[in-house]
Amino acid sequence: MAEPVSTTVTIATEHGSRYLQQLAKHWAHKFATEFDPTHASIVNDEGKGVELDASASQLSIRAFAADAETLAPWRQVVEDHIARFAFREELTFDWTA
């Protein structure tokens, strides 16, 4: 089996822990989820997943999937969810491979 492909982004925000925990709680009923206030790991049955790390000033996200075709829409799902949680601030997502 091939290694998953991934993409990362670091977002400047003072609310990274809040967004990390909201996403983990939101998906906990349907995905394998482990989290605390500074780290979350979320993986679905299809091998797509996301790891998040929060500090006082930023949120780092690594989204991964089996291949690039699957990764692009998955990354967008992750971004859309975080952006919805962060409706009080405008976040910039500049993903890198």
Image: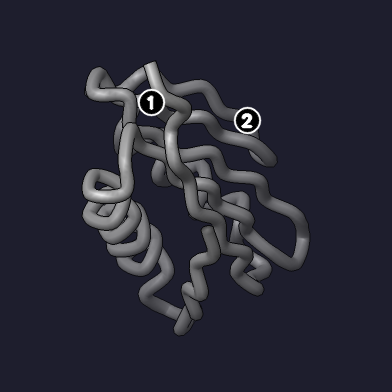
Question: Which residue is outermost to the front?
Answer: 2
Rendered-image quadrant of the N terminus: top left
Residue 66 at what x, y percent from top left? 33, 32
Horizontal side of residue 62 vs 86, given as left or right: right
Horizontal side of residue 4 vs 80, given as left or right: right
Q: Which residue is mark 1?
A: 43
The answer to whether 59 is drawn above or below residue 24 in the figure is below
Residue 61 at what x, y percent from top left? 55, 52
Identify the element where label 2 is drawn: loop
- The residue lying at 67 percent from left, 50 percent from top is 54
| Residue closest to the eye, 93 or 35 | 93
Q: Amino acid at mark 1?
A: Val
Spatial separation of the CA atoms under disc 1 and disc 2: 15 Å
- The residue lying at 24 percent from left, 23 percent from top is 46
Count the numbered circles shown.
2
- The residue lying at 49 percent from left, 67 percent from top is 95
Question: Which residue is outermost to the bottom?
Answer: 90
- The residue lying at 61 percent from left, 50 percent from top is 17
Residue 58 at what x, y percent from top left? 69, 64
| Residue closest to the eye, 38 or 72 | 72
The answer to whether 63 is drawn above or below residue 16 in the figure is above
Which quadrant of the figure has residue 79? Answer: bottom left
Which quadrant of the figure has residue 56? Answer: bottom right
Residue 30 tag number = none
Residue 36 tag number = 2
Horizontal side of residue 21 vs 13, given as left or right: left
